[in-house]
């Protein structure tokens, strides 16, 4: 075992972090300053605030109705993730097991996976009409749309993962008298845990940060998600940058905190999903 | 005891699949067909409308604004794809070598990917509007925002897109590099391949499947660029940074061009499918040759 570090590369990589940390630094610094502290020169923009006050945050939270908006974001992401894991895994299992045996499942597989090529731009306008006609131009409609948008990738991930799980496991359970349904939930669903984590992470990341779907479907319903609140905030209060940045920081924080705690799982999940 | 026929199979599998296929049809295929139908009408998004045959499609090819949005989108997508893949491959090689703080550095370089594109766009908007000009002023004596320049605003869009997508692509390249066994390098070293030749003859061919995935992913994402434009320029100045998605959204939803932009969306869909198929075919062939 040799333990010689490549120091020049390490140092270059640490210096490169400036590109990641600088935008975050600006966000924090401006969010804590008062408008009177902001000048036109570089040093006045980039210097640390004279006193660290949370008044911008308090005001930004009021303007964007922060707690309510946060709750919407959590609700949409949470329900989408739970339903994706339950429903997509089920379909992924059935399709994955049967697609070699029955034409019908093979067709269903290609039908769903081909959905990956459909850009949101073409669905956008008809979906607005459809959700309005069905009276689900609200959180419910947004969740249904996400369930459909993430179906291709998730079904593909689940049915791909199944090839690692020997069929003998289910057959043994069936010999013991279990139905396909109960065998699935007691044997297969728990075994697919690593894939559940991957699907949950990928789905959560895209749902939490998405702007376009809630923008076109919920606009007018009065419900906002965190990113969407920044959009309306910008058009109404765009000139007070300190307030705006406090609001941006508030929008970024939940994800940053989540990342700090689940960093390993997130990186593993992303790798798992991308390489499959 | 029931006797099992080989062709017979448990209906449970069907019931596990059907609800999702139905849902998929209702919220993906059905709107797709609907959008296709709207593309032959003069629907404005409200009120009555009539069929106009192929007129929308003819107009697409003569509409300067549409033409410009395609040029702009493709220009941005190509720049982003090239830059992202070069930068993330270099970064991945660095993060995969024997460095200190390996897991910490990897975690930090991934941060841009977990942040929402819209908010990141707003932060960069401020950077381009105030900080960069202030910096220019200090160094050159004068400075102005590139976001206000018809000629250079696209650069800002590219920068923000690259900043965000490098994170994800780097992680994919790292997992690609980890599949290359160490002894291949040792064998290569005996043959005298180091540095650039080692990269060209050993590393690159071995991670080619990952290059394919990354090229397809970055290209597809960059073609759909929307949030960044919304946050940085809103299509301006003088419509110089309108991407296809932004144009469809803006003019289709509030500009009374529902039918016309539906035709644009159909064209966009066809273009995306053609590009994806071409990329997969072309890259697939290259992989086979090795």
Image (cartoon, coloured by chain):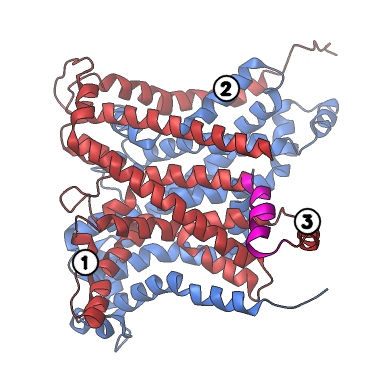
Chain colours: A blue, B red
User: Which chain is indicated by disc 3?
Assistant: B
Tell me the quarter of the image containing the C terminus of chain B.
Answer: top right
Front disc: 2 or 1: 1
Residue A73, horizontal then vertical, whole percent: 40, 52
The chain letter under disc 2 is A
Q: Choose between B9 and B2: the one closer to the eye.
A: B9
Name the foreground residue: B86 vs A34.
B86
Image quadrant in which the N terminus of chain B is located: top right
Q: Which mark is residue B145?
A: 1
Q: Nearer the viewer, mark 3 or mark 2?
A: 3
Residue B116 horizontal side relative to residue B258, left or right:
right
**Is residue A196 at least partly visible in the picture?**
no
Rendering coords of residue A104 (x, y %)? 62, 16
At x 67%, y 68%, the residue is B97
Answer with mark 1 or mark 3, whichever residue precedes in sequence: 1
- Which of the 4 quarters of the picture holds residue A135? top left
Q: Write down the region rendered in magenta.
A: B193-208
Foreground: disc 1 or disc 3: 3
Residue B184's disc is: 3
Expressed as whole percent of the image width and height from the top left, the position of residue A194 reads 68, 48
Residue in the image at 44% along x and 39% along y: A146
> Dot 1: few (<14), some (14–19), or many (≥20) neighbours within 10 Å?
many
Residue A108, label in figure:
2
Q: Which mark is residue A55?
A: none
Residue B35 belongs to the span the image colors magenta: no
User: Label 3: few (<14), some or many (≥20) within 10 Å?
Assistant: few
**Residue A199 % position (x, y):** 58, 45
């Amino acid at each position: 075992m040799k333990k010689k570090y490549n120091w020049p590369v390490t140092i270059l990589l640490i210096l490169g972090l400036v590109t990641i940390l600088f935008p975050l630094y600006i966000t924090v610094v401006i969010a804590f300053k008062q408008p009177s502290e902001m000048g036109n020169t570089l040093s006045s923009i980039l210097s640390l605030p004279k006193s660290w006050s949370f008044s911008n945050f308090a005001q930004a939270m009021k303007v964007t109705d922060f707690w309510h908006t946060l709750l919407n974001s959590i609700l949409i992401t949470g329900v989408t993730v739970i339903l994706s894991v339950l429903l997509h895994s089920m379909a992924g299992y059935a399709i994955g097991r049967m697609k070699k045996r029955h034409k019908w499942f093979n067709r269903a597989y290609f039908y769903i996976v081909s959905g990956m090529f459909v850009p949101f731009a073409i669905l956008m306008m008809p979906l607005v009409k459809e959700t309005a006609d069905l009276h689900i131009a609200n959180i419910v409609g947004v969740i249904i749309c996400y369930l459909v948008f993430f179906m291709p990738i998730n079904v593909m991930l689940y049915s791909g993962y199944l090839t690692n799980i020997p069929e003998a496991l289910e057959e043994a359970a069936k010999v013991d008298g279990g139905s396909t349904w109960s065998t699935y939930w007691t044997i297969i669903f728990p075994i697919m845990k690593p894939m559940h984590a991957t699907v949950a992470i990928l789905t959560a990341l895209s749902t939490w940060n998405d702007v376009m779907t809630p923008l076109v479907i919920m606009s007018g319903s009065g419900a906002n998600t965190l990113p969407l609140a920044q959009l309306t905030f910008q058009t109404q209060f765009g000139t007070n940058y300190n307030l705006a940045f406090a609001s941006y920081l508030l929008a970024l924080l939940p994800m940053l905190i989540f990342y700090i705690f689940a960093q390993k799982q997130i990186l593993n999940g992303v790798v798992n999903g991308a390489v499959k | 005891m029931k006797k099992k026929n080989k062709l017979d199979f448990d209906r449970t599998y069907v019931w596990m699949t059907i609800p999702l296929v139905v849902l998929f049809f209702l919220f993906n295929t059905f709107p797709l067909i609907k959008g296709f139908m709207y593309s032959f009408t003069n629907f404005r998004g409200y009120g009555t409308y009539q069929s106009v045959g192929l007129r929308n499609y003819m107009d697409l090819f003569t509409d300067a604004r549409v033409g410009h949005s395609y040029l702009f989108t493709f220009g941005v997508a190509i720049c982003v794809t090239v830059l992202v893949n070069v930068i993330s491959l270099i970064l991945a090689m660095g993060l995969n070598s024997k460095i200190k703080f390996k897991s910490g550095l990897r975690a930090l370089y991934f941060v841009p990917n977990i942040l929402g594109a819209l908010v990141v766009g707003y932060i960069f908007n401020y950077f381009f509007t105030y900080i960069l000009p202030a910096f220019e002023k200090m160094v050159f004596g004068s400075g102005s925002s590139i976001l206000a320049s018809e000629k250079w605003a696209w650069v800002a869009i590219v920068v923000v897109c690259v900043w965000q997508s490098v994170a994800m692509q780097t992680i994919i390249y790292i997992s690609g590099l980890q599949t290359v066994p160490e002894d291949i390098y040792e064998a290569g070293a005996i043959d005298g391949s180091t540095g650039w030749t080692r990269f060209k003859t050993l590393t690159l061919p071995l991670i080619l499947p990952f290059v394919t995935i990354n090229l397809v992913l970055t290209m597809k994402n960059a073609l759909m660029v929307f949030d960044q434009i919304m946050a940085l320029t809103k299509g301006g100045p003088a419509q110089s940074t309108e991407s296809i998605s932004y144009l469809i959204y803006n003019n289709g939803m509030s500009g009374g061009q529902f039918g016309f932009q539906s035709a644009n969306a159909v064209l966009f869909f066809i273009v995306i499918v053609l590009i994806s198929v071409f990329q997969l075919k072309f890259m697939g062939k290259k992989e086979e040759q090795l």
